[in-house]
Image (tube, rainbow, N blue to C red):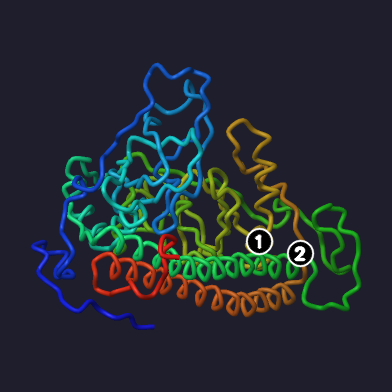
Amino acid sequence: MSFPAYQSYRESGVEWLGRVPSHWETKPLKAVTSCNDEVLTEATPPDYEIEYVEISDVQAGRGIKASTSYSFSDAPSRARRKLRDGDVLVSTVRTYLRAIAQVREPAENLIASTGFAVLRPQRAHSDFIGYAVQAEETINEIIARSVGVSYPAINASDLVRIAIAVPPVTEQRSIAAFLDRETAKIDALVEAQERLIALLKEKRQAVISHAVTKGLDPSAQMKDSGVEWLGQVPAHWEVVTVRRLATRVQTGTTPSSEPASADTEVGMDWFTPGDFGSGVALNQAAKRISIAVVDGGEARVFPAGSVLVIGIGATLGRVGVALTACSANQQINAISPDDTVDPFFLAYALSVQEEIMRKLSNASTIGIMNQDRTKDLSLCRPPLQEQAAIVAGIGGELQNIDALASQAEAAITLLQERRAALISAAVTGKIDVRGLVQTAEAA
């Protein structure tokens, strides 16, 4: 759908804003908002309950998605900014995250981090200001004015000097109403694609689980496995533990004499949990270690075909197959399978046991899936030829599922780009939406 433009434009006087409708003004944010008006003082009662919003609770284009409950005495020291209906939250740290949110009908005790600037619209429509700050032009200017490389930040005083295009208040209402309607449509489409991706992930796991516990032949005679989560399995399959099909289970190490490098031209892959994706094949690690470190015995080397299992942390239980000889850090256990099991079949069989591994790891204070617990994991071992067929069958199914998921992710990207472009076009006057929506006041 195309939208009409205004009849006449003028130069805004701001390079990155360009031309704006002739009757619009150009003003710094401080001319139409106040900043950081209210804070919780140290005199706040210790048992006062707050809902705390930090940077990670705000998603670009999605607003405030979460909060954490605290009593004031237990809350982080940065939990100080009071929020009111109509406020606009703008992250002043890690500005590349684009953590910006309009605050609508908040709880009385909603408190934001001091890592945000809280803009409170004055002499302007609050929703329009919320959209104006979300415009690509404004966000790019915030990022450009941020200082620092790894932790870029902008002072609130510099933030409020950023200029925006300001139409008359009645027009602000029309633009806000139009964007409320149109972004709601886009957001609903995004949510539908996200639900599809979630369903595809469940389908993906179900395909793997069924294949490695029931096989590909629906007419196969079944038997009780003796393992609760496995249930009935094909009668000709063995039920074994990892220790019965592994020649060795080792834990990775971190060399002390030389840090791992991102140089991909020399050395050996050194895997960490960040290298594990949705598939089981581990093609290349982000970092490598030198052969000198390997030869010096400071790193354990795992042969090609080793099955690597993350044994600690948020991704505990994630599994991958090393395609070449490699090393890994101490968060990873490496299983060297014997010649009775296909490495990819073993990886798939372990990949459906993340929840079991988490329960086993909780038997320790730190929550570690160590070598002994890894060796005690149960799984089925079909004949080798059948393992190969199962691996091929899983691969074909997952290829179709992953293709659908990729299409959904691409659709989300396009929808989000459309949303951002629409907001920018409306709040900078590139399109005239006055006749396209009725405001509540007009209705």
Q: Residue at x 35, y 39 (%)?
A: 256
Residue 121 appearing in the image: yes
Front residue of 347/3: it is 3
Q: Residue at x 12, y 65 (%)?
A: 12
Q: Earlier in the sequence, mark 1 or mark 2?
A: 1
Instruction: Give coordinates of residue 249: x percent, y percent.
Output: 60, 49
Real-space Cα separation, disc 1 to disc 2, in angstroms? 12 Å
Image coordinates for residue 371, horizontal then vertical, percent? 62, 43
Residue placed under numbered mark 2 in the picture: 381
Among the 4 quarters of the image, the one containing residue 365: top right
Classify mark 1: residues with Cα within 10 Å, few (<14), some (14-19) or many (20+): some
Q: Nearer the viewer, mark 1 or mark 2?
A: 2
Q: Amino acid at mark 2?
A: Arg
Q: What residue is disc 1 on?
A: 338
Q: Is residue 161 left or right of residue 55?
A: left
Residue 13 left/right relative to 77: left
User: Dot 2, how many residues are within 10 Å of its Cα: few (below 14), some (14-19), or many (20+)?
Assistant: many
Q: Is residue 370 left or right of residue 93?
A: right
